[in-house]
Image (tube, helix red, strand yellow):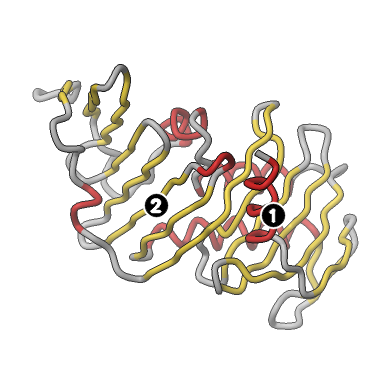
Amino acid sequence: MPAASTTLRLLAVSVIASLTVTGCQSLDDAGRTIGHADLVNDLASRLDRALELTYSADYQLPGGRTASIVQAQDPARSAYSYPGGKLTVTEDATTECAATGGRTVCTLAPPPAPGSKPTVAVFAEAKRRGMLTPPVVVGMLTDAAFDPDAVIGQSDTTVAGRHATCVDVERAAGDFTACVTTEGVLGSFTGQVDGRPMEVALSRYSETVDGAAFELPAGAGVVDKRTTGS
């Protein structure tokens, strides 16, 4: 509905200041002179470092749908919930749950190697169902930083009460706007992903987590595809 789309834009866009960076220079929060590649790389690095944070975040998607991200440390683990599915990454397994026909089935795969992060491919199903995860946005920002023809604008905004820095990217591969909070959490995203429009906006952020977020849905069937031998 149009109302849902309008709500997302109100959450994502309350711009304080804006300037255009077209391969020239801008100023970061510390007043340093930076080029457009540095600006985009800074946001990508901020998102990447946030994988080391403990937090829970709720997101609004188009059509009144919702999603969430929950992360905790010691041990590092994360959970991504989205319409019709859930993905958890722990030291024991990478688990993808999908609800079809009124039944939820969770498939367990080997976890990432110690000290490494999940590959972008792990988040493909979440993306297909409308939830754009931080690792996917990191990849898009990195690609934009290496695109000499990209036109990039910067702005500051407030999303769910958190200050965020945004970049407006115009490039042949698809335009998008991504906002990242000071903490490094994905604040919002609007744009083309794999040829289709996507919108995600942070609606709640907390530095506390509920341990139940990393558990499998109650009553879910389990398919264990982890290897048990060497």
In the image, 72 versus 189, the foreground residue is 189
Residue position for label 1? 9
In the image, 68 versus 112, the foreground residue is 68
Q: SS for tag 1?
A: helix
Q: Position of residue 198 (x, y in %)?
A: 63, 38
Q: SS for tag 2?
A: strand
Q: Position of residue 32 (x, y in %)?
A: 76, 78
Q: Position of residue 73 (x, y in %)?
A: 26, 62
Q: Amino acid at mark 1?
A: Arg
Mark in the foreground, 1 or 2: 1
Q: Are marks 1 and 2 in contact (CB under 8 Å)?
A: no
Q: For the residues marked 1 and 2, what is the alpha-carbon distance in whole angstroms?
A: 20 Å
Q: Residue furthest bottom?
A: 30
Q: Is residue 3 above or below residue 74?
A: above
Q: Amino acid at mark 2?
A: Ile
Residue position for label 2? 69
At x 77%, y 32%, the residue is: 173
| Res. 181 image quadrant | bottom right
Tell me the quarter of the image containing the C terminus.
top left
Q: Position of residue 109 (x, y in %)?
A: 24, 28
Q: Would you say 134 lies left or right of 171 here?
A: left
Q: Residue furthest top?
A: 101
